Amino acid sequence: MGVIGLDANGNELERTYYVVSGSTVTGASTNVTAQVGAFGGAQLGTYEESITGGYDNNNVSYWLYVNEANENDFGGKNIKLVNYNPNIVQFKFEIRENAALVPDQTHLLSQGEGFYYKKASDATEMPALQNQTISLSGSTPAEYDLYYGRPQTTLATSITKKSSTIVVFNPEKDNYFVLIDPTWKNAEIQVFDMSGKLVNDIVKVSSKDRYELPLRSINAGYIVHITSDKGEKVVTKILR
């Protein structure tokens, strides 16, 4: 299933995909077959899933353009879709089976299962239909749950709320920048090299700003610590 982000005029801004099959892989693995990371400052994507559904908090840096899961062990469980782009005001669903587009307004696929979606704050999931467009409400970032197969019971009790702060690579500047959770007032951003040496420390970075990391060395690894004004922390490893 493709989720296409549209602006107020119906123009496509970004898209992301969720792929399921009997051979695709659930969760963080070296054996993934379809998974692709989100690059280029993408603000619409999904996170790596826990095998029980929801965020995989052990792999918080997996920000994905194409996410995959196995239809046999992950049916009815949710992956987390997050939109950080305030100009995206609608989602359009594009559904394929064996790479071919299904007919307009189709929900159930040949095996009798279909995709579902809901905003994370909503109680009930809705069937996703081919070429269906839904309007978004509220501020960004906004979290959504995507499912293949309707969940039998609510997964809310098994999901740990995750900060929406992320580190994203921007190929236009050949560098990484930080998008800070807008529920934070500000953050301290510390950058360490792989030996543990502190190479940069900046405080009170506003959550309204995109902070470009001052990374100089090529082919070097770094660990980025981002701490909110309330003490919430996100740690990400990156390779410059």
Image: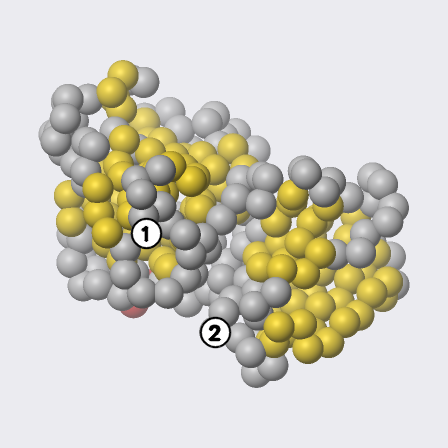
Q: Position of residue 83 (x, y in %)?
A: 41, 53
Residue wearing tag 2:
183
**Relative side of 225 to 80, left or right:** right
Q: Position of residue 96 (x, y in %)?
A: 27, 24
Q: Position of residue 95 (x, y in %)?
A: 25, 29
- Which residue: 37% across, 50% down? 88
Of 201 and 158, which appears nearest the observer? 201
**Relative side of 77 to 206, left or right:** left
**Secondary element type, mark 2:** loop
- Which residue: 32% across, 48% down? 8
**Secondary element type, mark 1:** loop
At label 2, the amino acid type is Thr
Q: Quadrant of the C terminus?
A: top right
Q: Position of residue 5 (x, y in %)?
A: 36, 43
Residue wearing tag 1:
89
The quarter holding residue 27 reads top left
- Which residue: 35% across, 38% down? 11
- Going from N to C along the chain, the mark reached first, 1 or 2, is 1
**Relative side of 180 to 35, left or right:** right
